Amino acid sequence: MEEITQELESKEYFINMGPQHPSTHGVLRLVLSLDGEIIRKVEPHLGFIHRSIEKMCEHDSYQQIVHLTDRMDYLSCHINNEAVCLAVEQALEIEVTDRVKVIRTIVDELNRISSHQLWWGVMGMDLGAITSFLYGFRDRELITDIFEETCGARLTMNYNIPGGLFFDIHPNFQKRTKDFITYFKKKLPEYDTLLSNNVIFTQRTKGVGYLSKEDAISYGVTGPTGRASGFSCDVRKHHPYMAYDRVEFKEILDTEGDCFARYKCRIAEMWESMHIIEQLIDNIPQGDYKVPTKAVIKLPKGEWYQKVETARGEFGVYIISEGQRSPYRLKFRSPGFSNLSALDHMARGCKIADLVAIMSTLDLVIPDIDR
Amino acid sequence: MNNEEIKQFILDHVAEAECVEGTQFLQVTIPSEKILPLATELKANPNTSFDYLFCLTAVDRPDHMEVVYHLKSTTHNHAFVLKAKINTRENPEVETVCHIWRTAELHEREAYDLFGIKFLNHPDLRRLLLTDDWEGWPMRKDYDDPINMIAY
């Protein structure tokens, strides 16, 4: 009898989730310590697509660095580009024209919407609903079409350069953006019908993966993930850049801190983004689309930190310059890296199926983490 | 607190701190041995309460190493840059701050991985981005890679 009880005692064991797992959205390997089906510890193993971008930057000119940044968080590529451009403009004391400011802001917000659309689609798919994936990509296509027409690329746009933009907007840009807003305002309530009010979906997300405000701050969790825990961290509000100080929008905050709160935050952010675009799209000022800069940009000696709000959170660029054509040291503070550090804390005590929901709502982009 | 008050606060705790008014933030350089008591105080003191470490990184200088902490307080909304200067490049060591700011755990592992800075009392100091058997510290300026694809 004694022997049998000994055999029935549960033991911790390990399984690998990833690097090739559909819900990791890339090559992320998680080593899970499990007690039955309960997660005791999550240990992320990173670096499968580490490209040493920071080291490359130490040899590149500032114009080249801009192109490396959209290979990190490819879903917020325009916003990443902007961070480097803003840092360089700040160091050289270049004041871009109003036209550039407004266009950058509009494209930023379109970028944010398209990132959230993709997130919404794949989150539904992670939790077993293929329909949302198709809906999300159907609507996202309209934005990538606008980008393709204006910037010449659908994903890695490279539309920003230090001092302004590569080229002026396409003549159709305003009309197509307005058409998209009209269209998407009808479609976004469909997202709610499909997932937000779905019983299976809410039961898998409500009360799962709780993160308190104190922990969010301590782990440096930003973006919609941090704001769903009540951490007011919207860079657009706290340190306005470009045209964000002249538009009216709300910072979406929630206090529940679970998966469903993070889900609601992102849906609400799409509404806010549309609201920002509506205020700007008819008021693009006339002017130049770029300020001339020298062919070889040399930053003065010193250091600069520039942060912007990407779709995933606070993206920071820390440049140390010694007066050369390349930075002495450049560090990218990527939002995904810090958000991932809270995963272990959030997932302890949950089941494996819950971990999929938590990862979805963290909205991880692996190249952003590995850099 | 404005920059002047932060400066005074740090000088009260670490007399040998060097303060530079940077282009953006106040930059304070302190010897690396003093980091743990100062960091604890900066977080715990209600007047400073720097609870948000938004960036942690390392810099390789010709004769020393630096660990750079970008700190912000979410209650008082003030920020500054703290730099811990490690006087050696041979075997750099500094106390970990990951029990003060939890986000430091992964950031310190990254700094260890790329710069070879040893964070004392870190709960799990291993290679993070590179493979476990990697030799050398790639982000150091003198790192020499025989099949270096980056060098021009």
Image (cartoon, helix red, strand yellow):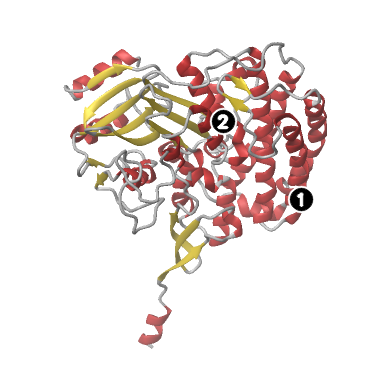
Q: Chain of mark 2?
A: A
Picture layout, residue A128 above or below residue A96: below
Q: Quadrant of the N terminus of chain A?
A: bottom left
Q: Nearer the viewer, residue B35 or A290?
A: A290
Q: Are there few (<14), some (14-19), or many (20+) residues within 10 Å of tag 2? A: many
Three-letter amino acid code of the residue under disc 1: Leu
Q: How many marks?
A: 2
Return the mark for residue A134. 1
Picture layout, residue A242 above or below residue A307: above
Q: Secondary structure at mark 1?
A: helix
* Residue drawn at the location 21% of the way across and 23% of the way down: B17
Three-letter amino acid code of the residue under disc 2: Asn
Residue projecting furthest to the left: B15
Residue B11, image x and y in percent? Answer: 21, 20
Q: Nearer the viewer, residue A175 or A272?
A: A175
In this rendering, position of residue B121 left or right of residue A55: left
Q: Look at discs 1 and 2 and give the one toward the viewer.
A: 2
Residue A197, image x and y in percent? Answer: 73, 47
Residue to which mark 2 is pinned: A81
In this rendering, position of residue A23 left or right of residue A329: right
Residue projecting furthest to the front: B152
Q: Nearer the viewer, residue A232 or B142?
A: B142
